[in-house]
Image (spheres, helix red, strand yellow):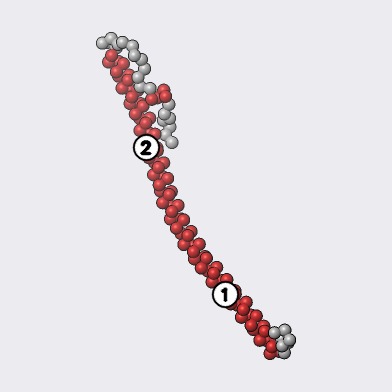
Amino acid sequence: MSDMKLTKEKMLTFNGHEKLSALKAPAKLTEFGERQNEANEALAANVNDLIKRVCALEDQEVKNKEIMSRIAAELSSFKKELDRVRLTEKLNSGAIERLDRAVRLAEGDGLDNA
């Protein structure tokens, strides 16, 4: 954030409603102009800081979307792989049970248990 903090005092460019003589008017006008310039500088610095912050947030949002998209793709790939492993495990378990039964039958052990 800007070092130029906006305060009521910084933004106050006109102070006083006294009647001015023709001799004091130029000095007061100059004082008002200087204060207005300071207020404008403070506002400009704060607006520029806000613009930078918004741009940084927008950049981060784009990065976050890209990251989330990659995570979603990885998650989908992981789910497919997990489903494949589960199916393989089921098929292997079934095959092992069938082979076990076949071996027991061949040995004559499983005739009573089949």
| 2 or 1: tag closer to the N-terminus | 2
Taking the spot 31% from the left edge, 10% from the top edge, the residue there is: 19
Taking the spot 45% from the left edge, 52% from the top edge, the residue there is: 64
Q: Which mark is residue 21?
A: none
The residue where tag 1 is placed is: 88
Vertical order, 31 against 113 (above or below): above
Determine the secondary structure under disc 1. Answer: helix
Look at label 1 and name its amino acid. Thr
Query: Tag 2: Cα neighbours inside 10 Å, few (<14), some, or many (≥20)?
Result: some
Q: Is residue 39 left or right of residue 95?
A: left
Residue found farthest to the left: 22
Look at label 2 and name its amino acid. Asn
Quadrant of residue 42 within the rendered picture = top left
Quadrant in the picture for the C terminus: bottom right
Q: Position of residue 13 (x, y in %)?
A: 35, 22
Quadrant in the picture for the N terminus: top left
